[in-house]
Amino acid sequence: MANKKNNTKKKSDNSSAKKNNTKKVVNSTSKKNNKVIEETAFDASLGKVIRLILIVGFTFGAFYFATWLITRDTTKKEEDNSYNSGFSYTEIMAGRSFSIKDGEYYVIYYDSTDEDLESTYSSLVSKYRGKEGALSIYTVNMGEGLNKSLINENSNTHPNNASELAINGPTLIKYSNHEVVDYYEGEESIKSVLE
């Protein structure tokens, strides 16, 4: 009988052990499932972060490329507008006429919104640019807002600063060391200098 009790005890111990092992298996399986779920969630969030970084990087790259293209085209245009002879044909505001860093230069004032004037004077300036030893020449569009205030029926042929400028029609002024040296008014007078 003692043997039967031992067998029964062993069976109950075995069934207890099996239950414990089953619990351990279930616990380890559920821990593994939790780990898998956590890893999957981590992988999903990591994937989102990587996608976000790629999108942001692509966007910045596209803007950088577009900026480079625009800058390259602008730089090319500026290079096309200047020659090795040391002068450039650029448009300035009338207020800058006395402050240009070149020692000697010309500034031509005319309304470039007028197609006839634009054609005539841009052609004259282009021809002048081709001359050897030509000075820098700048243009002022008298049709622009701030420059319009300098249009006057009475010209001032000896202005000492930009606020004293008074322009009556197409005018070419030669500056030397920030002072007016020569003053030419009208198409024939300007042609005689630039051609």
Image (cartoon, rainbow, N blue to C red):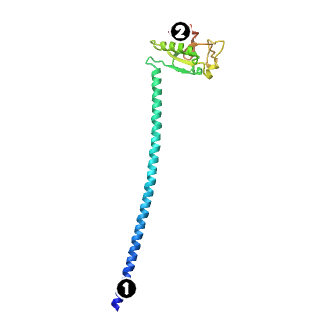
Viewer-side residue, 181 vs 37: 37
Residue 93 sits in which quadrant? top right
- Number of the label disc, if any, that sits on residue 191: 2
Residue 68 sits in which quadrant? top left
Q: Residue extending furthest bottom?
A: 1
Three-letter code for the amino acid on which mark 1 is drawn: Lys
Q: In this figure, which residue is indicated by the disc labeled 1?
A: 9
Name which residue lies at 47% across and 33% down.
67
Q: Measure how far apart labels 1 and 2 are at the Cα level.
A: 126 Å
Numbered disc 2: secondary structure: helix
Numbered disc 1: secondary structure: helix
Name which residue lies at 42% across and 59% down.
39
Residue 141 x %, y %: 58, 19
Tell me if 126 is positioned left or right of 11 in this view. right
Three-letter code for the amino acid on which mark 2 is drawn: Lys
Q: Earlier in the sequence, mark 1 or mark 2?
A: 1
Q: Residue extending furthest left?
A: 3
Crowding at dot 2, Cα within 10 Å, few <14 / some 14-19 / many 20+, comes out as: some
Tell me if 58 is positioned left or right of 116 in this view. left
Residue 142 x %, y %: 60, 18
User: Does residue 185 lie above or below 63 as drawn?
Assistant: above
Q: Residue extending furthest right?
A: 153
- In front: label 1 or label 2: 1
Name which residue lies at 47% across and 34% down.
66
Residue 176 sits in which quadrant? top right
